[in-house]
Image (cartoon, grey):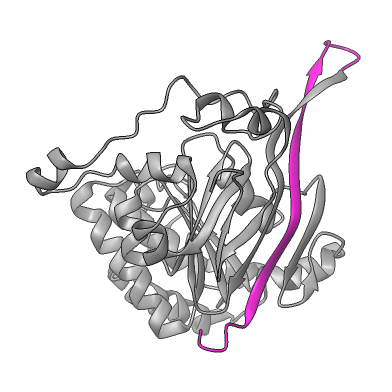
Amino acid sequence: MNDRQVLVQVKELKKYFPITQGILFQREVGAVKAVDEISFDIYKGETLGLVGESGCGKTTTGRTILQLYRPTSGNILFDNVELVTASSKKLRNMRKRMQMIFQDPYASLNSRWTVSRIVSEPLRVHNLHSGEDRTKRVEELLDMVSISAQCLNRYPHEFSGGQRQRIGIARALASEPEFIVCDEPISALDVSIQAQVVNLLEELQDHLGLTYLFIAHDLSMVRHICNRVAVMYLGVLVELTDRDELFSNPLHPYTKALLSAVPIPDPKITRSRKRVVLEGDPPSPANPPAGCRFHPRCPIATEQCKREVPEWRELKPRHWVACWKA
């Protein structure tokens, strides 16, 4: 991370989902602008946190980077290879190097498959190992995530949520990836288990030199695991900087509101700090407001904010923000 080598480059990425009408002849009458022209880099060996409220486009961003959704426009470069225009054969080879840990450990594992088959599937797809070597590799992967090799022939329903998520992590590691999108990997788990899974992810990162895009709601967990944090609102990025800088000196009013909602275990600090309570609900991504997306709920919005889209600019070294008033 010292030489800050870029592994993933996202440039002006858009992902729109069409809204259609009609039963026989479906015609497009609009679009849900889930991700709307965002740009950022992810450096080798770092964890970039992506935060924001539900429906802001975090998961869509992660899935579009991995080409699970094909982007509407923009560029995604992985290790200087353009993924958007890559052929299916080239993309298949690249997929070995990029994986995803899904949010729901109950829905992301095939209930009809044994643990052995679930974890060995990436090995089969990418022709990695065969016969006894494959079984041995599956046992190694399960050992990495602290699941006993005696569980090889058990089914997902026989495990707890935390254990299922560990199996999901083992599956993601099977093809020896360099980059993993962690899509809220702890939000469906018990609080007591969350810290164990995050510690496991950190250990694996140190041991295997992994790079993470860590999508989350929980800002206290983001502070623990991430090197840099990007804040997203209604399909656009509003702030991006180093973790400590974001928590000590947030510049965007939305980031300030998010941070003011983080619980602090000291009642004196809780009583003395100022809460920022946002009015109203987020607008629909199918019909976002003109100008700054955040202006209908922003306590410091001006006429300029209502008319003009704020420029994505670097106000301080490595501190990017999209706000006219920052």
Looking at this view, is 288 or 10 the one in front?
Answer: 288
Residue 300: x and y, percent? 49, 33
Residue 216: x and y, percent? 42, 50
Question: Is 120 included in the stretch rendered in magenta?
Answer: no
Residue 266: x and y, percent? 10, 49
- Does residue 81 appear to the left or right of 195 in the view shown? right
At 8% across and 43% down in the image, what residue appears?
Answer: 267
Answer yes or no: is residue 133 visible: yes
Looking at this view, is 93 or 126 the one in front?
Answer: 93
Q: Quadrant of residue 272?
A: top left
Residue 271: x and y, percent? 13, 38
Q: Is residue 106 above or below residue 199?
A: above
Q: Main secondary structure of the magenta part?
A: strand
At 83% across and 68% down in the image, what residue appears?
Answer: 89
Looking at this view, is 67 or 235 the one in front?
Answer: 235
- Residue sticking out furthest to the right: 25
Total residue callouts: 0
At 62% across and 83% down in the image, what residue appears?
Answer: 5
Q: Is residue 131 above or below residue 218?
A: below
At 75% across and 46% down in the image, what residue appears?
Answer: 14
User: Which segment did they paint magenta?
Assistant: 1-26
Q: Is residue 305 above or below residue 174?
A: above
Answer yes or no: is residue 152 visible: no
Q: Is residue 246 above or below residue 309?
A: below
Question: Is 23 included in the stretch rendered in magenta?
Answer: yes
- Does residue 146 appear to the left or right of 215 in the view shown? left
